[in-house]
């Protein structure tokens, strides 16, 4: 079997057929595969740079892209090609990166690229989770020393039953949705949202997901075997560790180890610990610089940071596992002090400063109209998003200086997690049609800023008067695991996140979980430890909710005085044109006259928004009037807009006129219309008839003397008199004439 021959393997996972293929495409890449689920296909390629870099981290780049051609579309925009990644592509790039990064060999310093491209989409199955398995398979075929394979899948609960690789239609009905990635019998990443489900249901889903992930891992191992059997030799690169001069290591250890051990046990806050660490580094660097003439200490100062980091890693973990202590002195389940400041800026719709320890989030809620919804352009097409949560992490929050160039992957990811957590608790759009935006500004950070955004965002919505189902709080859980010893930590601070093995964020209400995200730095986590972390997270979440309830236990009864008032009117869809008017004339006039914003949807829903309730009421009345249909037999209060020899034209509501024939003006016969009526007079009239052309015949006489409308005192003339030949005049001017005369 030649290498050029295609290798194709299949496995049934959760009742769905997953296919991996290799051997034909992109043969200059380190490893290349396609992953198939029905007609949705993701191409994945992994490539390793030949020469190493002098870096102290894994130089991995993971990119996921969705091509418009995959669904038979031409991209929009001026350039008609895919440009900067959409939020979904950025988030999926993170989904792929997070489970594969921890499995690279320690010291790996070759630049490694994993690229995933959606080349076909059947508009039924999402491609994102396929990219996790595809990236893993490509790495397995490459020369990267990587401890895979990894499988990824989505699992939902629909009508009480779990579904693996659900369709978009099934996902819309789900009360639980998880993306799970892991090795055989060990979890690496969990992410998703839920409709207040219990910890028990969550754990049950993880158990099932792990069993199906094992199949995906076995499928990849078979793919590697088949590829090698076809003649492909997979030779893994050796890790070239950069050796630190022994003299430098010895000097730094001598000067720093004991002071750092003491500092970690002094229960210092972040600033205090950072000051001591920085002072030690500076002193040691100065000493090494004085020895730069000695070859044993050559370039010694550049290694100080790495050695100090290793000391802190070792000592902080020993402190936790051996001495059962945390760097700041808290117990394993103890939460940092919480402070809540409501309405720091009264002009805003809803605002709060939420502080937990040295993490501070300023959260602001803004209420907008349906026209403010965000248009999302994804591979399956466009849709509108009613709820946005934007997370900002400026450099001053950690005492650093760097240029601000817009949100990066981390900001987009944290914002998406906080958004998912709160979204499940929002009121239905038909009950509360506002567009909602939360902005979380992280003004101080020492761990768990995304969960502070959940707590602060929930309180900001409460403050704005949004009738949420319940409050939402979030907690970040950590783990230190070595050998047979482990410790699960509640509300981890920055140093515990940096030196720990897990970052597991769980958010929800008192009734259950709504959002979650777990990342591992080790090669997997057992289900039993995961269940322990879930139970501990619940206790922490309830504690935080108690603190929030003590400040603001429920949404404010009234909307913020500065928020727009939003009114919904339903009109016949065929009346939308009449409301908008020629070139938008009518709707612009109403908006300018009453200081409101008006949004019109295709189904005839009209939203009137403004800060002045009186102006909104007047605008509503005009909208209703412009779209009203006259009813036979109904009495209207109109006004005279023009007088003719044969009668008067009366506007019964804006834009709608009818003919009040001279014979129907009064119970007695009159010779001239002007005997009774003049321009702009208000007059009560009854609709007698609406002809097929929409022309309306009115009667004042029927209002004065009910039943007399057919008892004409003179010859009945239901229209204008015939004009002599050659004369001008008004012809057939009754009905809806589109304006005054």
Image: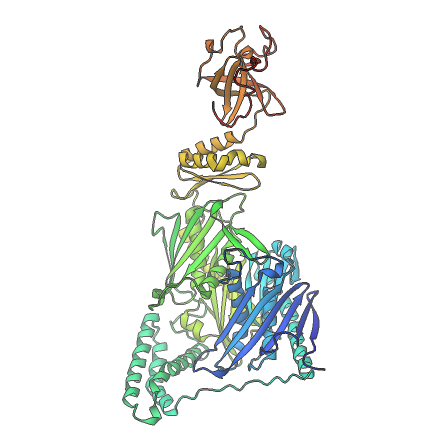
x and y percentages locating residue 635 in the rendered image: 54, 20
| Residue farthest to the right, as pictured | 1
Task: Give the left or right position of residue 337, taking residue 539 as reference.
Answer: left
| Res 714 visible | yes
* x and y, in percent, of residue 617 in the image: 45, 33
Q: Is residue 607 above or below residue 384?
A: above
Q: At which x and y percent is residue 620? A: 47, 33
Residue 634 versus residue 592 in the image, above or below: above
How did the renderer colour the structure? rainbow
Quadrant of the rendered structure where residue 38 is? bottom right
Kindly tell me whether residue 151 is visible in this rendering: no
**Residue at x-position 36% and y-position 92%:** 247
Q: Residue furthest bottom?
A: 295
- The quadrant where residue 698 appears: top right
Q: Residue furthest front?
A: 726
Please tell me which residue lies in front, 323 or 197. 197
Q: Is residue 404 above or below residue 468?
A: below
196 w.r.t. 619: above or below: below
The foreground one among 229 and 162 is 229
User: Could you say which quadrant of the image residue 595 lies in?
Assistant: top left
Image quarter in which the N terminus is found: bottom right
Number of numbered labels in the structure image = 0
Q: Position of residue 239 (x, y in %)?
A: 51, 85
């Amino acid at each position: 079997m030649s290498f050029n021959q295609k290798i194709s393997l299949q496995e049934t996972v959760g009742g769905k057929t997953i296919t991996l293929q290799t051997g034909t495409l992109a043969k200059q890449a380190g490893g290349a595969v396609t992953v198939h689920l029905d007609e949705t296909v993701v191409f994945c390629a992994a490539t390793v740079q030949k020469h190493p870099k002098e870096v102290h981290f894994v130089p991995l780049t993971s990119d996921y892209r969705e091509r418009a051609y995959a669904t038979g579309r031409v991209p929009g925009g001026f350039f008609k090609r895919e440009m900067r990644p959409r939020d979904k592509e950025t988030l999926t790039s993170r989904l792929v990166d997070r489970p594969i990064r921890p499995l690279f060999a320690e010291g790996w310093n070759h630049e490694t690229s994993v690229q995933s491209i959606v080349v076909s989409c059947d508009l039924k199955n999402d491609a994102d989770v396929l990219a996790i398995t595809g990236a893993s398979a490509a790495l397995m075929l490459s020369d990267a020393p990587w401890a895979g394979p990894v499988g990824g899948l989505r699992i939902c609960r629909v009508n009480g039953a779990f579904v693996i690789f659900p369709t978009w239609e099934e996902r819309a009905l789900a009360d639980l949705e998880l993306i799970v990635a892991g090795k055989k019998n060990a979890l690496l990443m969990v992410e998703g949202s839920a409709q207040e489900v219990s910890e028990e249901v969550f754990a049950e889903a993880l158990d099932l997901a792990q069993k199906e992930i094992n199949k995906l891992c076995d499928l990849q191992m078979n793919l590697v075997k088949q590829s090698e059997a076809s003649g492909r030799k997979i030779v893994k690169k050796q890790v070239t560790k950069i050796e630190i001069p022994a003299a430098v290591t010895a000097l730094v250890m001598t000067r720093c180890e004991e002071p750092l051990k003491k500092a970690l046990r002094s229960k210092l806050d972040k600033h205090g610990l950072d000051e001591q660490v920085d002072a030690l580094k500076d002193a040691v660097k100065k000493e090494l610089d004085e020895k730069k003439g000695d070859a044993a200490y050559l370039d010694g100062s550049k290694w100080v940071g790495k050695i100090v980091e290793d000391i802190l890693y070792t000592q902080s973990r020993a402190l936790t596992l051996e001495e059962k202590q945390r760097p700041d002195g808290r117990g394993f389940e103890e939460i940092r002090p919480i402070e809540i400041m409501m309405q720091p800026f009264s002009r805003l719709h809803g605002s709060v400063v939420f502080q937990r320890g040295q993490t501070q989030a300023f959260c602001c809620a803004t209420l907008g109209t349906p026209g403010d919804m965000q248009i999302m352009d994804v591979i399956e097409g466009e849709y509108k998003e009613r709820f946005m949560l934007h997370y900002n992490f400026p450099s001053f929050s950690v005492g650093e200086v760097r240029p601000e160039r817009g949100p990066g992957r981390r900001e987009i990811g944290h914002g998406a997690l906080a958004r998912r957590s709160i979204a499940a608790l929002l009121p239905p759009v038909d009950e509360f049609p506002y567009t909602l935006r939360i902005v979380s500004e992280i003004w101080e950070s020492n761990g768990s800023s995304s969960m502070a955004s959940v707590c602060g965002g929930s309180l900001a919505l409460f403050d704005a008067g949004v009738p949420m189902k319940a409050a939402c709080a979030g907690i970040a859980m950590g783990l230190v695991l070595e050998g047979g010893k482990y410790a699960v930590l509640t509300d981890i601070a920055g140093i515990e996140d940096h030196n720990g093995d897990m970052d597991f964020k769980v958010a929800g209400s008192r009734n259950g979980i709504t959002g979650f995200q777990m990342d591992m730095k080790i090669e997997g986590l057992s289900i039993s430890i995961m269940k322990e972390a879930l139970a501990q997270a619940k206790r922490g979440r309830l504690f935080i909710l108690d603190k929030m309830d003590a400040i603001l236990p429920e949404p404010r009864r009234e909307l913020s005085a500065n928020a727009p008032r939003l009114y919904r009117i339903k009109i016949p869809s065929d009346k939308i044109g009449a409301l908008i008017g020629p070139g938008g004339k009518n709707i612009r006039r109403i908006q300018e006259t009453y200081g409101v914003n008006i949004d019109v949807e295709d189904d005839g829903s009209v939203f009137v928004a403004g800060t002045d309730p009186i102006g909104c009421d007047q605008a509503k009345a005009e909208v209703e009037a412009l779209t009203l249909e006259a009813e036979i037999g109904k009495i209207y209060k109109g006004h005279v807009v023009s007088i003719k020899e044969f009668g008067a034209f009366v506007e019964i509501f804006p834009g709608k006129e009818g003919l009040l024939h001279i014979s129907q003006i009064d119970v007695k016969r009159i010779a001239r219309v002007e005997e009774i009526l003049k321009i702009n007079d208000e007059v009560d009239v009854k609709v007698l008839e609406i002809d097929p052309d929409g022309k309306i015949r009115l009667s004042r006489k029927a209002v004065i003397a009910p039943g007399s409308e057919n008892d004409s005192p003179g010859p009945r003339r239901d229209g204008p008199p015939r004009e002599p030949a050659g004369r001008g005049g008004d012809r057939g001017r009754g009905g809806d004439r589109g304006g005054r005369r």
